[in-house]
Amino acid sequence: MAPPTVTSNPDDSLNISWEKVPAAEGALMSYELAWDQGASFIKTVDARLKITSETSFTTEALHPGKAYRFVVRSQNACGYGQYSAIKGFALNQRPEAMQSVLASVNYESCSLDVSWAQPPTAL
């Protein structure tokens, strides 16, 4: 199974989608999506699992600046298939608010000059 596709939303949730698996031996019953923040999620209770018959899922709002990993597998009457390859995704960290913005009017050139300091934790 191919790794899932991951896209971000403005509210820090993620859309995860995957290719439909053709039903072969036994009718396809569901997909299992697992994700974490970088631990070995396949064997830990911290893994978040979602079992669905759909080929997409939207997470709740996640934490900006954190990296997540996703895998998916299918299930039919004979059991689960193998997990897909891991798909990693990092949510961008929002910059801190600027401490101050300075604005001055230049009457000679009829312009407005604006300047600000870079936030202390900006990359």
Image (cartoon, grey):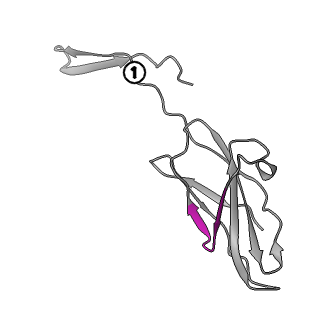
Q: In the rendered image, which quarter contains the N terminus?
A: bottom right
The image quadrant that residue 78 belongs to is bottom right
Residue at image x 23%, y 21%?
112
Q: Quadrant of the C terminus?
A: top right
Residue 87 percent across, percent down from the top left: 72, 53
Residue at image point 57% right, 63% down: 57
Crowd around label 1: few <14 · some 14–19 · many ≥20 (10 Å): few
Dominant secondary-structure state across the stretch colored magenta: strand
Name the side, left or right, on which 40 lies relative to 18. right
| Residue 54 on the magenta segment | yes
The amino acid sitting under disc 1 is Met
- Picture residue at 48% right of the left edge, 29% below the top: 95
Q: Which residues lie in the magenta part?
A: 49-57
**In this picture, residue 99 sits left or right of residue 102:** right
In this view of the protein, which residue sits in the foreground, 44 or 83?
44
Residue 40, x across and y down, in percent:
79, 45
Q: Is residue 64 left or right of residue 18?
A: left
The residue that disc 1 covers is: 98
Residue 66 to residue 31: above or below: above
In this rendering, is residue 121 above or below 46?
above
Secondary structure of the residue carrying tag 1 is loop
Residue, far front: 45
Closest to the observer: 95 or 12?
A: 12
